Image (spheres, rainbow, N blue to C red):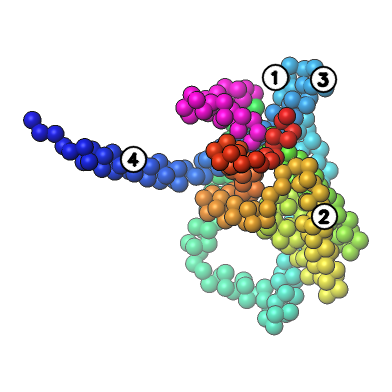
């Protein structure tokens, strides 16, 4: 009875390991959208858990009741904000569509294009009705998918926040038993870093929204509260968010005279410089400091993996990756002394 040489078995084992790793990587790539949705649920659950812990600490309520109070309070706050500013924002969106032809014509005239809106209409009308219907259908499916994803993330987040220890223990058991303490500590620090990052981001978004709203009110743009709210909310997205948030204000300015456009663009640039060089650095000293190059790399990587959702969540994902690398690799594997953001508040 003949046996294969040991070298053949070693080669076969290496081939099988390579195939297994390749298969896992392919499945992970295919399920990237699902993983990013799961991370969004984890991020929301961390925030809900932190808020519930604060409510329980000050009210002496049990954790379950504290979570319920937190969820109801957030829903009530969202309802109040919607009732106060929803009409303005909806009116602003309607005003954008009403003033869009004039704004496009003004922008086209600046670029030397006469009747730019009419030419755009003609270009769109040249497409077949089937193409237009298929585009409308895709938009409808996209909107439905966004709503269903938001609902899924919210429900999963509430379940995670209600009993995080169950899911935490399950995640830890995926690793060898001798690594359980390290992984548990890394998860706790990551959660603390996410809470710190979110608080810092919320403060930055609020300040940017207030400054933009005041600036747009002083310039004389319509619906300055709504425009400021959009500028503050889009500041959540790194790098491209401020550009997206400035577009509605610039569009409204284009419907007026050149001086309004110049004042609007100048205000946006000054506020963004103030946010990038003063507000964010001051907040990051007490929260989580991310180097700009690392944010750009995270934006590119997670945007390629998860599309627009990956872009929106690129910064918190980068925070988690940075914490895990600093904790598990730089400190505990290489033995280097390094400061980890979430650990400063967890001690």
Magenta stretch containing residue 172, yes or no? yes
Q: Residues within 10 Å of mark 2 (few under 14, many from 20)?
A: few
Q: Which mark is residue 64?
A: 1
- Badge 3 element: helix
The residue that disc 2 covers is 278
Between the residue at mark 2 and the residue at mark 1, the CA separation in whole angstroms equals: 40 Å
What is the tally of numbered marks visible in this picture?
4
Q: Which residues are drawn in magenta?
A: 162-191
Which of marks 1 and 2 precedes in the sequence? Answer: 1
Quarter occupied by the N terminus: top left
Q: Is residue 119 above or below residue 65?
A: below
The residue that disc 4 covers is 17
Which of marks 4 and 2 precedes in the sequence? Answer: 4
The front one of 186 and 304 is: 186
Check if mark 2's residue and mark 1's residue have beta carbons within 8 Å: no
Q: Is residue 156 left or right of residue 284?
A: left
Which of marks 3 and 4 precedes in the sequence? Answer: 4
Which of marks 4 and 1 precedes in the sequence? Answer: 4
Task: Report the residue at 89% width, 64% height from top.
Answer: 219
Task: Report the residue at 73% width, 39% height from top.
Answer: 196
Q: Residues within 10 Å of mark 1 (few under 14, many from 20)?
A: some
Whole-percent x, y for residue 261 in the image: 82, 70
């Amino acid at each position: 009875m003949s046996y294969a040489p040991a070298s053949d078995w070693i080669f076969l084992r290496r081939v099988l390991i390579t195939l297994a790793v390749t298969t896992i990587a392919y499945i992970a790539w295919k399920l990237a959208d699902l993983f990013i949705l799961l991370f969004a649920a984890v991020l929301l659950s961390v925030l809900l858990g932190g808020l519930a812990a604060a409510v329980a600490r000050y009210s002496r309520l049990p954790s379950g009741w504290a979570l319920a109070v937190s969820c109801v309070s957030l829903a009530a706050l969202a309802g109040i904000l919607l009732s106060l500013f929803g009409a303005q924002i909806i009116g602003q969106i309607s005003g954008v569509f009403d003033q869009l032809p004039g704004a496009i014509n003004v922008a086209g005239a600046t670029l030397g294009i006469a009747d730019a809106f009419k030419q755009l209409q003609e270009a769109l009308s040249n497409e077949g009705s089937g193409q237009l219907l298929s585009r409308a259908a895709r938009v409808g499916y996209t909107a439905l998918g966004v709503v269903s994803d938001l609902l899924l993330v919210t429900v999963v987040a509430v379940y995670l926040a209600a009993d995080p220890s169950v899911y935490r223990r399950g995640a830890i058991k995926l690793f060898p038993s001798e690594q359980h303490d390290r992984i548990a500590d890394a998860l706790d620090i990551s959660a603390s870093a996410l809470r710190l990052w979110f608080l810092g981001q919320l403060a930055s978004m609020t300040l940017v929204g207030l400054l933009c709203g005041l600036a747009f009110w002083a310039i004389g743009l319509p619906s300055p509260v709504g425009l400021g709210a959009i500028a503050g909310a889009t500041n959540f997205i790194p790098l491209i968010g401020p550009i997206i948030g400035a577009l509605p204000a610039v569009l409204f300015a284009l419907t007026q005279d050149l001086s309004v456009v110049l004042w609007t663009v100048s205000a946006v640039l000054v506020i963004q410089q103030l946010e990038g060089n003063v507000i964010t650095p001051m907040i990051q000293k007490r929260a989580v400091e991310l180097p700009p190059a690392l944010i750009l790399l995270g934006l590119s990587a997670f945007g390629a993996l998860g599309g627009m959702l990956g872009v929106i969540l690129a910064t918190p994902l980068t925070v988690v990756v940075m914490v895990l690398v600093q904790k598990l690799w730089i400190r505990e594997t290489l033995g280097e002394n390094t400061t980890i953001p979430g650990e400063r508040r967890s001690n």
